[in-house]
Amino acid sequence: MGTENTGRAQSNGKNDVLDSAVRLFNEQGYHGTSMRDIAKGAEITAASIYHHFASKQEILQSIMRRALQGALAMTRTAVLHSDGTPAGQLEALVRAWVHFHVSHQLDAVVGATELRSVEGPGRELVIALRDEQESLFRDVILRGVEQSAFATPYPHEATRTVISSGQSICMWWRPDGPLTPEELADRYVTVALATVEYTGR
């Protein structure tokens, strides 16, 4: 029982550090934030933070992985529950992409802006996760082109446009704004289908 409680406390402590870091990275940027700042935000001592993470770089990589893995989980699930058509899969992808960037806004901002700050071997994993997410969109769009559901002559550019437009939501969306997440998703689905030149097939 004691071991379980210790493990849970360590896990909670780690999450507290990540949550503090992601808030500060949003406010001050990665390079403008110190380990002492993160410890203070997590309400632990500067020395205690090193029980959870060896460095600020390790914290950043953990946040990046959390963001990318969370987005992948949501978008993969959406595709699996779609109707299986290219248009249906793209709609499901875009809806999940929008909802992720609204519901995990702070993580998403760090994921979108701090890739340049990721260093060392962990960078390869972060880039691999990013590429996996892009390939999920690209595969759906390419299949749509092959099946004449999408008429765009530029599927790779269309893929990047759909991804980047949805990703930018985390930079400006506010819960007290004029659009609900669902209304926002509706609009971005319309934009995505126009981008790939959906033929109605």
Image (cartoon, grey):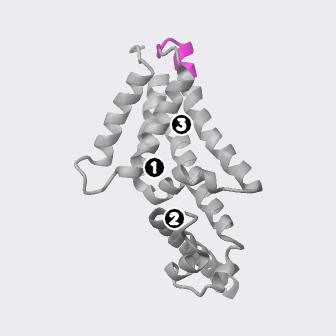
Q: Secondary structure at mark 2?
A: helix
Location of residue 173 in the rendering, given as x and y in whole percent from the top left corner? 34, 51
Does 109 appear above or below 35? Answer: above
Q: Within the image, what quadrant is residue 36 found in?
A: bottom right
- Which residue is most to the front? 32
The answer to whether residue 193 is above or below residue 94 is: above
Q: Amino acid at mark 2?
A: Phe
Q: Evaluate whether residue 187 shows in this view.
A: yes
Q: CA distance from mark 1 to mark 2?
A: 19 Å
Q: Looking at the rendered structure, which numbered label has been put on residue 100?
A: 1
Q: Which residues are magenta?
A: 142-151
Q: Few, some or many C-alpha atoms within 10 Å of disc 2 (few <14, some 14-19, many ≥20)? A: many
The amino acid pointed to by label 3 is: Leu
- Cβ–Cβ under 8 Å for marks 1 and 2: no
Using the image as rendered, state which of residue 32 and residue 64 is in the foreground. 32
Considering every residue shown, the one lying at the far left of the view is: 178
Instruction: Inspect this view and state whether residue 82 appears.
Output: no
